[in-house]
Image (spheres, helix red, strand yellow):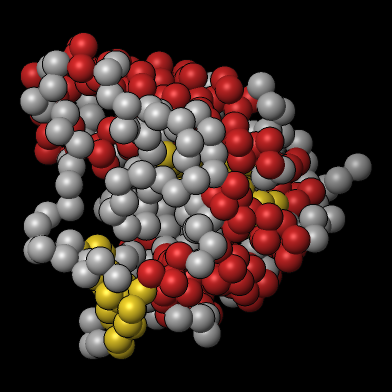
Amino acid sequence: MNGRERMALAMQHKTPDRVPVMCQLAIGHYFLNTDLKPHEIWFTSEGFAEALVTLQRRYRFDGILINLPGRPENLLDDVVSIEETRDGELLTWANGDKTLIPWDDNAQHYMADGSDLPRFDFMSMGVEELDRLDDFTGYLWNTYHIPWLPGKKDKGPLTEVPDYFFRTIDLVREKTGGEVSVHGEVFSPFTHFMELIGYENALMSLIMDPDKAHALLDRLTVSSVTWAVAQAERGVDAVLMSSAFAGGPLLSPDMYREFVLPYERRVTEAVRATGVPIYTHTCGSIGDRLELMVETGTMGIDTLDPPPLGNTELADAKARIGDKVFIKGNMNSVALLQFQSKEQVIEHATERIRLGMPDGGYILSTACSVSPKVEPWKLELLVPLAEEIGRYEVG
């Protein structure tokens, strides 16, 4: 049984040959553990695809998460210099802007005039003004600041996807030859909301101007649905909805029900209509909202952070929602960074397999991303362990 088949069965609550293994890696982990330059990974579809497949093969993971959209072809032609500094690669663009790509972290963009990156001026707008915007895509493209998505023709929310967005997906599918489960990622409407207007402004607006917050979330949902469905129709094996900020203590369960649940439900319904699984990634404390997350229509829940980053115990989650959704995660990301011995890693992963595997529907994974500086040897232990102790009796 190959990884793609194994993951498909786990996501359907059927029994694979063994517990699948698939961790999400921080972008900095690719920078530190492949031979590619950071700018090649961050700014080119070809570089990111190569990094994804290189580490999947090294760790023998059953799946790959493509968590950046493809980049425009020849994007780096606009770069006039690349300097290696102590802090990372420093790119200077033709317009004078600069991008610092730390050796172990996501890129940081700086405007040529020293001003802050522009934020969407949500706080000063009235609700009625949102419908008159004609230069707002609704999709925050996490590469560098640009006023318009290259290749986008229509005004307003993202209702059509530029073809280059798919480039990394196409390359990874080609490189893995149908043997590995390939997953796309889309920001949830609430994640877009937080990123677009700034975390403090976003949280304050939920209290001070909830009607306007709902109006913008409604608009952002259009963009989330568009990109999620486009990936499903392009051939990914699953879509992960990144809803990183929807856990506690940022949001109460009541606020989750009002500002997250109805909009994520629209995304899950649209993807499920294509026949492709969709699951949800939420960081932090979600032990008090597992059932609410299920109400969104998601088919799986990812991360399940244990203390200190969260409050989810795997046995409790399995008992409460394990018959409704598949579960991915719960390995302690902080502890994995701190472990010094093979025995510590194996003991921790063994307990996750023991608790998660009964009756299927469990994928062994770290909770949230693997830190950039987690040593590769620790991840190399996981698949052999699953092969040894995570096998199901298949009739």
Residue at the (53%, 55%) spot, across then down:
70
> In the image shown, does 236 or 298 lie closer to the viewer?
236
Above or below 281: residue 66: below
Residue at the (29%, 16%) spot, across then down:
131
- In the picture, which quadrant includes the C terminus? top right
Give the total of numbered labels.
Answer: 0
Check the image and name the residue furthest to the right: 395
Image coords of residue 72 (percent x, y): 50, 58
Above or below 35: residue 361: above
Residue at the (68%, 42%) spot, across then down:
234
Specify whether residue 75 is in view. yes
> In the image shown, does 385 or 276 lie closer to the viewer?
276
Above or below 185: residue 228: above
- In the picture, which quadrant includes the N terminus? bottom right
Residue at the (25%, 39%) spot, across then down:
196
Above or below 295: residue 150: below
Specify whether residue 304 is in view. no
Image position of 120 (left or right of 391): left
Image coords of residue 54 (percent x, y): 62, 74
Image coords of residue 265 (percent x, y): 48, 20
Instruction: Classify residue 114 by image quadrant.
Output: bottom left
Image coords of residue 273 (percent x, y): 66, 21
